[in-house]
């Protein structure tokens, strides 16, 4: 049995597109304490940046089937990266939250369009090998996440007032990637029946709720872990941001090696294991008052989070009755609700009860995600999963 796939030019173009947007995702969430300090805002107001990005993901989910139908997967990805670059420039230049919140929405819209396109592109291009291709592409994207966190953290440590400029490294990378991209023609012909649409099953929508819980717990941790570490250990915002780089490191390791270790297990079992690992990492993080132990806990939480997006997305596609573009559009809306609601709600609770108590919402989300996987099993072919050798 074949245990590999060809990492062709198409794969590298798609993977590096997601690296570009992950540089932003890896830097923006952990730097919320820095942004709060610059703007003099509460946790609630700072959480509105996550809400804006969540709304952007919902809008991208609504737009995704139409953009994919009209322009095809390749052009849609570049449209997303163009919007992302314009939004990022505006965000870095924003003087106050009145500007940074709407520019976060624009940037987030570009991010979501790019990620949605990468998911459907890999699914279409690699067919039955898409699980391993998707997880490897996500592992490479995690390198961007870690790089973004480290770059902004280092800039903040050494040049406190210029930390935002660390995010701008994503833009020249977008430009370079465009000129050195895979130039295989994308012979897209719009379907005469129009964008994929129609009613989805109850099993899809229950799995959709589980997907929301997965993403909500991920963004609650990525947005506010730095604030929790500051509260528990007394670390500076810059140091806590560097510590959160462990989250991206854990995600990269889990995406690259997780499929190899768990390849003989069905998809649902793999997802349950990853959710369990996240729960262990979060528990240690919440109880920790030691900087080194918090670093290890965030790393373990990152391992658990690593493949939840990919595996939960494949579940949604499996429940979509061969309508992947529609499923991805709905998953983007789910991610948007999670991104919009989770960091903001955690910020509101943090202002009222303190960040430590507010963080108790995370294990509730983890439990919901786990229970739904158990109650709503998927049927992704075992043959595909056995080939998931990363």
Image (cartoon, grey):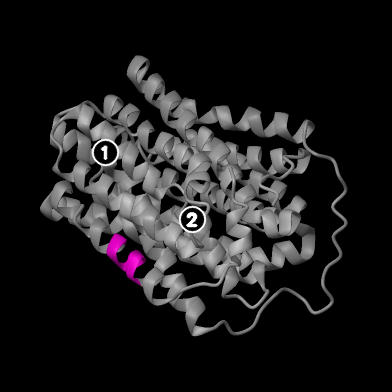
Q: Residue at x 34, y 65 (%)?
A: 370
Residue where numbered disc 1 is placed? 297
Secondary structure at badge 1 equals helix
Q: Which residues are magenta?
A: 366-371
Q: 211 or 265, which lies in front?
A: 265
Q: Is residue 292 above or below residue 190?
A: above
Give residue 294's position: percent from left, percent from top.
23, 34
Q: Alpha carbon of mark 2 to alpha carbon of mark 1: how far?
A: 20 Å
The quadrant holding residue 285 is: top left
Image-based side of 372 in relation to 40, left or right: right
The disc at residue 13 is: none
Mark 2 or mark 1, earlier in chain:
1
Residue 153 can be seen in this image: yes
Q: Residue at x 38, y 39 (%)?
A: 96
Residue 244 lies, in percent from the top left, at 33, 34
Residue 79 located within the stretch drawn in magenta = no
The residue indicated by pointer 2 is 309
> Quick one: 276 or 87, which is closer to the camera?
276
Vertical position of residue 146 compared to residue 279: above or below: above
Q: Main secondary structure of the magenta part?
A: helix
- Residue 32 appears in the rendering: no
């Amino acid at each position: 049995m074949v245990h590999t796939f060809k990492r062709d030019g198409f794969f590298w173009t798609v993977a590096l597109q997601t690296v570009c947007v992950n540089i932003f995702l890896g830097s923006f969430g952990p730097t919320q304490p820095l942004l709060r300090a610059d703007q003099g805002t509460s946790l609630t107001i700072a959480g509105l940046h996550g809400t804006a990005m969540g709304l952007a993901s919902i809008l991208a989910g609504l737009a995704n089937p139409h953009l994919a139908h009209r322009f095809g997967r390749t052009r849609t990805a570049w449209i997303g990266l163009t919007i992302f670059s314009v939004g990022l420039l505006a965000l870095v230049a924003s003087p106050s939250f009145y500007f940074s919140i709407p520019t976060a929405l624009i940037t987030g819209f570009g991010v979501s369009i790019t990620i949605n396109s990468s998911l459907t592109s890999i699914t279409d291009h690699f067919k039955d090998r898409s699980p391993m291709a998707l997880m490897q592409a996500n592992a490479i994207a995690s390198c961007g996440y870690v790089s973004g966190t480290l770059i902004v953290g280092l800039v903040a440590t050494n040049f406190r007032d210029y930390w935002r400029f660390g995010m701008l490294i994503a833009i020249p990378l977008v430009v370079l990637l465009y000129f050195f991209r895979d130039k295989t023609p994308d012979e897209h012909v719009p379907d005469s029946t129009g964008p994929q649409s129609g009613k989805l099953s109850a099993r899809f929508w229950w799995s959709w709720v589980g997907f929301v819980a997965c993403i909500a717990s991920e963004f609650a941790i990525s947005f506010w872990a730095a604030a929790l570490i500051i509260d528990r250990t007394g670390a500076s915002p810059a140091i806590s941001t560097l510590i959160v780089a462990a989250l991206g490191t854990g995600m990269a390791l889990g995406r690259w090696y997780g499929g190899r270790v768990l390849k003989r297990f069905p998809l649902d079992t793999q997802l349950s294991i990853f959710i369990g690992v996240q729960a262990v990492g979060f528990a240690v993080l919440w109880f920790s008052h030691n900087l080194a132990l918090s670093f290890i806990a965030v790393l373990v939480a990152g391992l658990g989070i690593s493949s939840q997006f990919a595996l939960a997305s494949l579940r949604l596609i499996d429940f979509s009755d061969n309508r992947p573009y529609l499923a991805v559009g709905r998953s983007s809306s789910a991610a948007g609700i999670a991104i919009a609601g989770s960091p903001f709600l955690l910020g509101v609770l943090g202002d009222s009860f303190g960040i430590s108590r507010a963080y108790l919402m995370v294990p509730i989300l983890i439990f919901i995600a786990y229970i739904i996987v158990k109650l709503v099993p998927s049927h992704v072919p075992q043959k595909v999963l056995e080939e998931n050798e990363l």
